[in-house]
Image: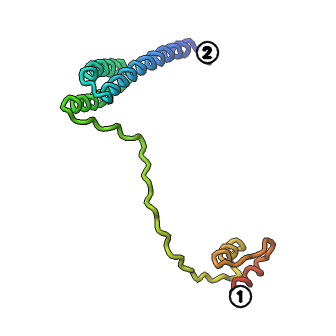
Amino acid sequence: MANIKSAKKRIKVIDKKTARNIRVKNHVKEAEKAFLAAIAAGDAEGAEKAFKLAEKKLMQAAAKGTFHKKAASRTVARFAKKLNALKSGEAPKAEPAKKAVKKAAPVEEAPVVEETVKADASMKKDELLAIAEKMGIEVPAKATKADILAAIEAK
């Protein structure tokens, strides 16, 4: 908690601005939903009214600094494009998914090519176990490095 008088005042100011921004954003969201619902229903007259309200709310939010003015203008332009498409009789395009996940094409498994790996005594036990596993050699859990090396050389 702040002890200095000016810091206490800043906290109050920030709380007021946060509350205002939340209120403004809620008004914008309501106007946007009404417009998009009218577009989805194909109601050109209702969409026109909802567009005017949405544009007004977006520009007010931009004037208050809740949204950047270019972001608000961009949103209004997109809405206008949808409204014009509805008026001209074209079907409005569906909203693109935020993050579309591409489905990977089934991958054909590549033929297994056996590598000729030479195991020697300078290798670590983990490396020797990996080589033995690739070659299909079953090694007991308590096998020593020498035992693993001998099993690899025997095969």
**Residue shown at 36%/18% (left/top)?**
64
The residue furthest bottom is: 154
Give the numbered dot on residue 3.
2
Q: Nearer the viewer, residue 15 or 56?
A: 56
* SS category of the residue bearing label 1: helix
Label 1: few (<14), some or many (≥20) within 10 Å? Answer: few
- x and y, in percent, of residue 68 in the image: 34, 27
Asked whether disc 2 touches disc 1, contact meaning CB atoms under 8 Å apart, the reply is no
Q: Nearer the viewer, residue 95 or 29?
A: 95
* Above/below status of 5 relative to 104: above
- x and y, in percent, of residue 151 in the image: 73, 83
* Above/below status of 31 relative to 96: above
**Residue shown at 23%/30% (left/top)?**
86
* SS category of the residue bearing label 2: loop
**Residue shown at 33%/22% (left/top)?**
58
Q: Is residue 132 left or right of residue 65?
A: right
User: In terms of image quadrants, where is residue 54?
Assistant: top left
Give the numbered dot on residue 98.
none
Q: Is residue 31 left or right of residue 142?
A: left
Mark positioned earlier in the residue sequence (2 or 1):
2
Q: Nearer the viewer, residue 82 or 113?
A: 82
User: In terms of image quadrants, where is residue 136?
Assistant: bottom right
- x and y, in percent, of residue 107 in the image: 46, 65
**Residue shown at 79%/75% (left/top)?**
143
Give the numbered dot on residue 154.
1
Q: Looking at numbered disc 1 in the image, what kind of residue is underneath it?
A: Ala
